[in-house]
Image (cartoon, grey):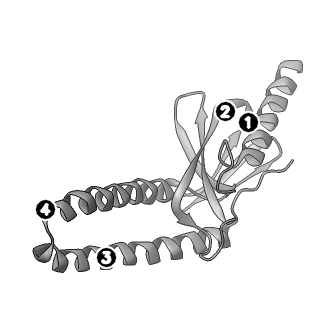
Amino acid sequence: MDSRFLSFMEFESVYFYRFITLAIFVTSGVLLLFALPGMTRAEMAVLLPVILTLWGRFAVEYSRVKRCGPASIHDDELVISSARGNRRIPLTHIRSVTSRHSVFMVRRYRSWKDHLAFMEVTLSNGERVCTLAESKVFEYPAGKKTLSAVQAAVRAAKANSVGK
């Protein structure tokens, strides 16, 4: 199975670069506050919506990463680690698996290939559990190798449970 979930060490790298990106956004916000009095209305009308859109997207991704934890598939179970402990979810209890691209969350800067995908697993009871996986920049759907591997594992587990 070709599931490329992020390991614990890679999660720590994501947290580090999330902090660096937050520091860059805070610094740009402070600099923007000093530059606002000297700007014309036309400049503000162009710049402010772009900056607010970027900040909004970063806030959404920041909260998504906060909910994520390292994951792996072991013995027909999805194992997700977090500060609250390890959680073992039988693959037969998974209803769907979706993925979304990240814009700001990376494992390291200076690399176009090290982007991430948010993998969201919806359980049979409606609960959603998230993790991160490797993705390429223009890959559709995001993290498609991991997404297809997890979906295949879920189908196989469900087929095995029906066969028993």
User: Where residue 44 sits in the image (x, y, percent)?
Assistant: 19, 63
Q: CA distance from mark 3 to mark 1?
A: 44 Å
Q: CA distance from mark 4 to mark 3?
A: 19 Å
Q: Residue at x 34, y 61 (%)?
A: 55
Q: CA distance from mark 1 to mark 4?
A: 55 Å
Instruction: Locate residue 72 relative to residue 126 in the image: left or right.
Output: right
Q: Nearer the viewer, mark 1 or mark 4?
A: 4
Q: Mark 3 or mark 1: name the one nearer the start of the chain.
A: 3
Q: Mark 2 or mark 3: name the one nearer the start of the chain.
A: 3
| The label number, if any, that marks residue 56 in the structure image | none
Q: CA distance from mark 2 to mark 3?
A: 42 Å
Q: Which residue is mark 1?
A: 91
Q: Which residue is mark 4?
A: 41
| SS assignment at label 1 | helix
| Residue 14, quarter of picture | bottom right
Q: Which residue is mark 2?
A: 94
Q: CA distance from mark 4 to mark 2?
A: 51 Å
Q: Which residue is mark 3?
A: 28
Q: Mark 1 and mark 3 in contact (Cβ < 8 Å)?
A: no
| SS assignment at label 2 | strand
Query: Tag 1: residue type?
Result: Leu
In the rendered image, the vertical position of residue 86 relative to residue 128, given as above or below: below
Q: Mark 2 Cα within 10 Å, few/some/many (few <14, many 20+)? A: many
Q: Residue at x 43, y 60 (%)?
A: 62
Query: Tag 2: residue type?
Result: Ile
> Which residue is nearer to you in this view: 122 or 100?
100
| SS assignment at label 4 | helix
